[in-house]
Amino acid sequence: MTTLDQPETLRATAARRYFAATRSRFWRGCMDADPALIAFVLPWSTTAVIVILPLWLIAIAPTFEPKKFAETLRRPISWLPVAFFGLAVVGTLWAGGQWGARLLAIGPAAKLLLIPLLIYHYERSSRAHWVFIGFAASCCLLLAYSFLIFADPGWQSTAAHGFDTTGIPIRNAIDQNQEFALCAFGLAAFAIDEFRRRRVEYAAIAASLAALFVLNILFVALARTALIYLVVLAVVFVGRQISGRWAIVAFAAVAAGVIAAWFISPYLRSRVEHVAVEYREYRETHRPTSTGQRLEYWSSAAEWIKERPIIGHGTGSVRRLFEATAVGKEGAWADRVGNPHNQTLYVAIQWGLLGCIVLFAMWYRHFRHFAGGELLAWFGAIVALQNVLSSLFNSHLFDFAEGWIYVLGVGVAGGALTKSRAVSPAPTR
C-alpha cells in the first residue's frame, strides 16, 4: 500500500465506523432517551429543555432520510405547523418597529417545526412510551412536592411566582394545573385500559394517582382557566372511554363530583366567586384586577384587528402595540405586556384572518388525527384539546411550558399512532 493510499483508507474506515455507530443500539437509545428526558425536565426547568434539545437534533441528524421525511411532511398534521412558522417569518416583512424585535418574535412559533420531526422519528421508533412515562413520573414528583409544601410551607422553594404560591413548588398555578390535568386524564384512561386487561392492581394505582392530581388542582393550587378544560375533558373522557349504560353512570358521577367539590372546597368557591368581585372592581374603579386586565387587553386587541383584519400588523407587533398603549398610564396599567392572553387574538393581531385560518386548521387537523379508541389517540387528543381550551384565556401555544407540551404530545403521539395504525387497524371500544 502506498503512502497516498493510507489517508484514503483511514477516512473510509472512519466513515464505516461512524455509520455503524449511528445505527447501533446505543445510538438509537439516545435518540429515544433525549425526548423522554425533555418530557421529564419540562415541568421543572426551561434551561434543561434548551440544553437537551440540541443533543437530540445532533443524534437524529446522521439517521435522517430526506425522502422518508418528505413523505411525513405531505400530511397536514406535519406541514401545517411548518406553514404556521413560515407565516411568522413572512409576517416580518410588513411589521413595523425594529428588525431585532421582529426576528425575536418568530421564536415562539419556531418550536412548531419540531412537530413533523417528532412525527417522523416516532413513526419509526417503538419507544414513544418512554416520553409519556418520563412526563408522568416527573409530574408525580411535582405532585408529592406540592402536597408537601401545602402541608408544611417551610419547604417552599423560591422558584414559584405569582400572587399566591401556596402548593406551587415551581413556576405558577397555570403551568402546574396544565401538567396535572394531562396526567389525571391520561392515567384515568390508562386505568380503564388496564382494568379491561384484568390487571386490576395497575388500574387501581393509576386511578388513585389520577384522583390525587385532580384533588391537588381543586383543593391546593387552582388557576381558574383549569376549570374550563377540566369540565370539557371530563365530558369528552366519558364519551370516548366509556360506553353503554356505564356512560350514563359516569356522567352522573362527574356531575356529582363537581357539585361535591363546590360545596366541600371553600378555596374553589372563593376562586370562582372572585371573578365577579374583580369584574365589579374593574367596572366601578378601573382597578387593574386579573379579570379587568384581560378584558382591557381583549378590547385593545379587537381594535387593532379591525385596523388590519386580513394580514394583521406583522410579526412582533403585539408587544409594540401594547407598549404604546401603556404610555402615560399608572400602576399595573403601565406594565409593558406583550400578550393579549388569548391565542386567537395574539395570532390575529400579527397575521389577521390569514393567521387564524392556519391556526384553526392546525388545531383541527391535530385533533382529528387523534380520533379513535387507542390509548395513544387519547393521549394526543387531550393535549390538543386542552391547548385549544386553555388558549381562550392564555397564549399557550406560544408560552414555553404549554407550547412544548403541545409539541411533544402531538409529535410523539402522532408519530406513534401513525406507526400503530400502519400495522393494525384502529380498535373500537
Image (cartoon, helix red, strand yellow):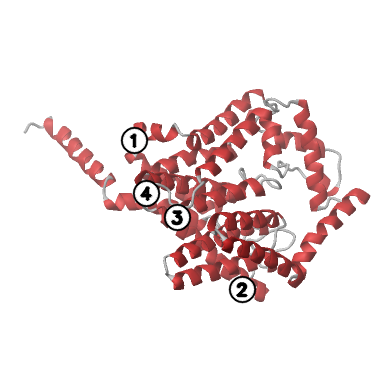
Element type where label 2 sits in the image: helix
Q: Position of residue 131 (x, y in %)?
A: 45, 55
Residue 111's label in the rendered image is none
Observer able to see residue 402: yes
Give the residue at x 78% y 60%: 272
N-terminal of the pair, mark 2 or mark 1, is 1
Which amino acid, by three-letter code, is at mark 2? Answer: Leu
Circle 1 crowding by C-alpha within 10 Å: few under 14, some 14–19, many from 20: few
Q: Nearer the viewer, mark 1 or mark 4?
A: 1
Quadrant in the picture for residue 264: bottom right
Marks 1/4: CA distance? 15 Å
Q: Position of residue 428 (x, y in %)?
A: 46, 52
Circle 2 crowding by C-alpha within 10 Å: few under 14, some 14–19, many from 20: some
Q: Which residue carries the number 2 mark?
A: 148
Q: Nearer the viewer, residue 95 or 23?
A: 23
Query: As displayed, is residue 38 above or below residue 73?
Result: below
Q: Which residue carries the number 4 mark?
A: 31
Q: State the residue lying farthest toward the front.
A: 245
